[in-house]
């Protein structure tokens, strides 16, 4: 379905009013402010508007369809998908959107397969029971609020996506916290729409990763195709990398072979150990980004500068950033920079710290930040290696309270929404654990091998291997569930996964 029809903006607006589409009305009314801000040019603005119109129209059709359907179950959703020639994943994502706009209630029905002493009890998805609310549009609680609510309720991951897509450039995310210039905000709600911490249809994300047509259970590290342990053969990267240097080697290869034009990542700023986003232009820039950074850094805010450059992109980032990118690919409204992303390279992340917290950790370890050469989290401890050759450690449980509160509601250790995920857990020292999740990721990894850029083994050949990775991922998920339950009990806002 496409709305490349000859229709005036007033005509679109009239239809938007009928559908009660706040998003379209605001985009039309604020056209001049959007163009004046320079984030999108007129052609890009028109494309975004039409694509948003398509999205709203199909959502409206789904709501209409469900209002007249009985029973409202998975089969009905499949029928809607076939009738409208859309993927079932698209329909499921719209279902989630309608749910979050309080237009429907969705009851998920599960089957329990009882286990024994060797196999745990399995819960598998059986069906949906969907109820449409008969509410007048004026009574529907508007969800078109800016992401300020996410910042203010300690749910913001600090990914920077909202700042990267805001059509009037009125959000800044710094040191893990966001700020909106209320005078400039046009209240379009796009930040809310894409933010991974408003709501995130995790099962749809997994289905898209797998190319699956059914909802099913995934492992504690999400969907993956292959698992490896690997390390770089590029000497300069090996000298400066944290573990196996695979992330840097991916970027080096992609930039060197001109497969991408630019990459988004993180480098250290002039302030010691305070990272900042970087747009990498060539393979030499890769060396600026090596090493793990534990201080939160909003990489994705760099996207806003890239709409007008027709450049193929790779993005390196932590799991919340990969979720933000995959969510925006699912609810795609043709934002140019997002559509230019060809590779999502995810890194493992247990938690992140504010810069002030890192200074506090240094204080506890009695070390000056200027003297820190490398930091690492391993075997339940935070390590600081100093320029003078000392190795200092502190148990994570002693500094857990210094991690960002917003990271407590994060369930994803291994960047489940990436094409390829890279970390250290599971591999021996000096090596990376690599999870290949999509065909894009597989092709990239195979190219690294073909070009003799890496040494690669099956993860099953190394110790501690996959079991440790799965254990740590499970523990992060359990911790997240506990925090979300606590927020629910205290009637506080939490991300809807
Ligand atoms: S999670 Fe990302 S998109 Fe959401 S408010 Fe925070 S920085 Fe913005
Ligand atoms: S802050 Fe959010 S609601 Fe306001 S203009 Fe930017 S994207 Fe739109
Ligand atoms: S713990 Fe989660 S929310 Fe926090 S920085 Fe890592 S991926 Fe993002």
Image (cartoon, rainbow, N blue to C red):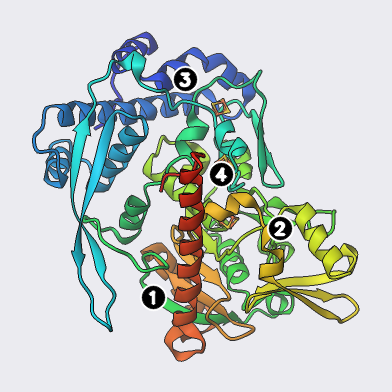
Q: Which residue is mark 3?
A: 27
- The answer to which quarter of the image holds residue 267 is bottom right
Is residue 314 among the parts visible in the rendering? no
Earlier in the chain: of badge 2 and badge 3, it is 3
Rendered position, 208 above or below 284? above
Does mark 4's beta carbon lie closer than 8 Å to ligand 1? yes
Q: Which dot, 2 or 3, sits closer to the camera?
A: 2
Q: Give x and y (percent) for residue 179.
A: 67, 33
Name the side, left or right, on which 76 lies relative to 267.
left
Element assignment for label 1: strand
Q: Which residue is mark 1?
A: 226
Element assignment for label 2: helix
Q: Which residue is mark 2?
A: 402
Q: Answer yes or no: do the residues labelled 3 and 1 have beta carbons within 8 Å?
A: no
- The answer to which quarter of the image holds residue 255 is bottom right
Q: Which residue is mark 4?
A: 155
Q: Give x and y (percent) for residue 429.
A: 63, 84
Q: Answer yes or no: do the residues labelled 3 and 4 have beta carbons within 8 Å?
A: no
Earlier in the chain: of badge 4 and badge 1, it is 4
């Amino acid at each position: 379905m496409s709305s490349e029809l000859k229709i005036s903006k007033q005509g679109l607006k009239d239809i938007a009013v009928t559908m009660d589409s706040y998003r379209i009305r605001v985009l039309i009314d604020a056209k001049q402010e959007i163009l004046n801000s320079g984030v999108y040019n007129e052609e890009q603005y028109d494309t975004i508007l039409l694509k948003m119109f398509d999205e709203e129209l199909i959502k409206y059709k789904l709501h209409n369809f469900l209002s007249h359907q009985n029973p409202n179950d998975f089969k009905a959703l499949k029928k809607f998908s076939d009738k409208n020639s859309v993927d079932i994943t698209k329909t499921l994502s719209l279902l989630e959107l309608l749910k979050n706009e309080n237009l429907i209630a969705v009851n998920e029905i599960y089957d329990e397969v009882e286990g024994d002493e060797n196999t745990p009890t399995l819960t598998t998805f059986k069906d949906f029971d969907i109820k449409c609310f008969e509410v007048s549009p004026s009574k529907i609680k508007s969800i078109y609020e800016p992401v300020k609510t996410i910042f203010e309720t300690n749910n913001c991951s600090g990914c920077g996506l909202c700042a990267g897509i805001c059509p009037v450039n009125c959000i800044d995310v710094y040191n893990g916290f966001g700020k909106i210039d209320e005078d400039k905000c046009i209240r379009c709600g796009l930040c809310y729409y894409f933010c991974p911490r408003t709501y995130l249809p995790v099962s749809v994300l997994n289905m898209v990763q797998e190319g699956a047509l059914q909802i099913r259970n995934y492992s504690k590290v999400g969907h993956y195709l292959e698992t490896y342990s690997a390390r770089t053969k590029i000497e300069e990267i090996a000298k400066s990398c944290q573990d196996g240097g695979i992330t840097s080697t991916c970027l080096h290869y992609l930039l060197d072979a001109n497969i991408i034009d630019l990459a988004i990542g993180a480098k250290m700023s002039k302030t010691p150990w305070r990272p900042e986003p970087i747009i990498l232009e060539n393979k030499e820039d890769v060396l600026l980004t090596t090493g793990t950074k534990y201080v939160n850094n909003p990489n994705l805010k760099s996207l806003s500068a890239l709409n007008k450059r027709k450049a193929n992109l790779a993005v390196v980032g932590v799991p919340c950033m990969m979720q933000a990118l995959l969510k925006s690919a699912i609810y795609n409204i043709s934002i140019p920079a997002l559509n230019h992303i060809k590779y999502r390279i995810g890194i493992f992340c247990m938690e992140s710290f504010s810069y002030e917290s890192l200074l506090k950790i240094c204080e506890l370890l009695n070390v000056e930040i200027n003297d820190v050469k490398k930091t690492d989290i391993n075997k339940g401890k935070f390590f600081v290696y100093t320029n003078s050759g000392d190795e200092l450690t502190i148990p994570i449980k002693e500094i857990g309270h210094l991690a960002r509160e917003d990271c407590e509601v994060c369930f994803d250790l291994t960047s489940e929404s990436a094409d390829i995920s890279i970390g250290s857990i599971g591999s021996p020292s000096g090596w990376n654990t690599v999870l290949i999740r999509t065909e894009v990721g597989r092709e990239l990894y195979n190219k690294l091998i073909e070009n003799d850029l890496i040494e690669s083994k099956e993860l099953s050949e190394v110790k501690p291997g996959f079991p440790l990775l799965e254990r740590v991922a499970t523990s992060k998920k359990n911790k997240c569930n506990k925090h979300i339950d606590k927020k629910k009990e205290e009637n506080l806002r939490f991300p809807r996964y």
